[in-house]
Image (tube, rainbow, N blue to C red):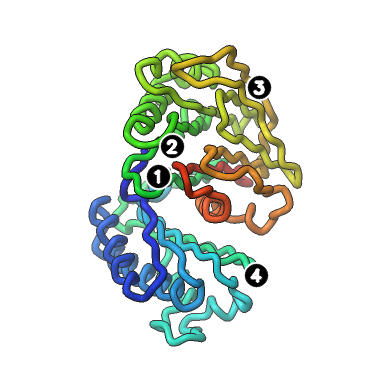
Amino acid sequence: MHDPMETPVSVTESSQVAEARRHAVRVAQASDLSETLQGKAALVVTEAATNLVKYGRGGYVLVRPYAEPLAHGLEILVLDQGPGIARIEESLDDGFSTGGTLGYGLGAIARLSSQFEIYTAAGAGTAIMARLDDERRPAEPVRRKPPLAVGGVTTPKSGQEACGDAWSCRWADGTFWVASVDGLGHGPQAATAAAEAVRVFHAVDGGGSPYDVLRDAHKALKATRGAVMAVAAIRPALGTMDFAGVGNISAVLIQEHEQRRLSSMDGTLGYSVRAIREQSYSWTPSSMLVLASDGLSTRWNLGEQVALRARHPSLVAAVLHRDYARGMDDASVVVIKGLAP
């Protein structure tokens, strides 16, 4: 179900910068993150939001907590559809400013961040991801780098507080599971259907299959208005991915320069499903899987967008959402990306 703390904060004028900053601090506080991190978040969002007004022709800030095997903290996404940054390397120097901002600049945002990425294109805007790790996390034994990374963006229809789109993921016995759900329609009833589908997704035994998840979800959703759903089970060590979908969740597998749309069966879970068909595909460290609800247009093509594909999945998902969300419905996109060992 949609997390209200994931609601984007629009920044189109200078008076909204302070609200974006306060929102970031509230999210950090609600997530029980450190005061030091809260202070960093305030600085990062203030400078980034100021840049949105001065250079980006307005945009939005998305702040949410994150938790991964090796780190947890706050993720800040900042997106605009402005002219882009022509001199990116100069902009990353501390103190560089062409318009009288605070002087922190992108370089200082990067320095304050545990992980920082930027994607910009001439005439198509700029997208920034800044992750701030909570320094209070207890030291853990050195663990191997995960073989893949995941990130997504989910937003409700404008004017709605409940969101009928959802996505979720989990590791089980060396298999990475991910699901994308779109409850029929929008609003609270759609959100209830999506939440029930996610519950089933987590309840199915790790030794099961995407087919099992969809079969069980179809039974469980009969008491709801129904949903469409896609499920993938990725086994990086074996180099395989199993996939099954019912309904119009868009599923795209990108490998090298090829973008392949995966087929789902017609129907609606909880209402009418003629068949569930599971298919297997290869998975490599360079593979990328994108699952998107029909709140996004399907006109995008990542096959040739090498620069964007090289970014963190959260940033890829945010750019796709920015550029292709229809704006008249709930919208969700999740990106899974293989990582070289």
- Report x, y in % for residue 13: 38, 73
> Which is more N-terminal, label 4 or label 3?
4
Label 1, residues with CA under 10 Å away: few <14, some 14-19, many ≥20:
many
| Residue 309 in sight in this render | yes
On screen, residue 182 above or below 141? above
- The residue beneath circle 2 is 165
Rendering coords of residue 229 (x, y %): 51, 27
Helix, strand or loop status at disc 3: strand
Q: Mark 2 is on which residue type?
A: Asp
Q: Quadrant of the N terminus?
A: top left
The residue that appears at 62% across and 78% down in the rendered structure is 87
Q: Secondary structure at mark 4?
A: loop
Q: Amino acid at mark 3?
A: Gln
* Mark 2 to mark 4 CA distance (whole Å): 32 Å
Q: Are marks 4 and 1 in contact (CB under 8 Å)?
A: no
Q: Nearer the viewer, mark 4 or mark 1?
A: 1
**Mark earlier in primary sequence (3, 1):** 1
Q: Residues within 10 Å of mark 2 (few under 14, many from 20)?
A: many
Question: How many neighbours does mark 3 have within 10 angstroms: few (below 14), some (14-19), or many (20 or more)?
Answer: some
Residue that label 4 marks: 122
> Residue type at mark 4?
Ala
Dot 3 and dot 4 residues touching (CB under 8 Å): no
> Marks 2 and 1, Cα distance to the nearest angstrom?
8 Å
Question: Of label 2 and label 1, which has the lower sequence position?
Answer: 1
Residue type at numbered disc 1:
Pro
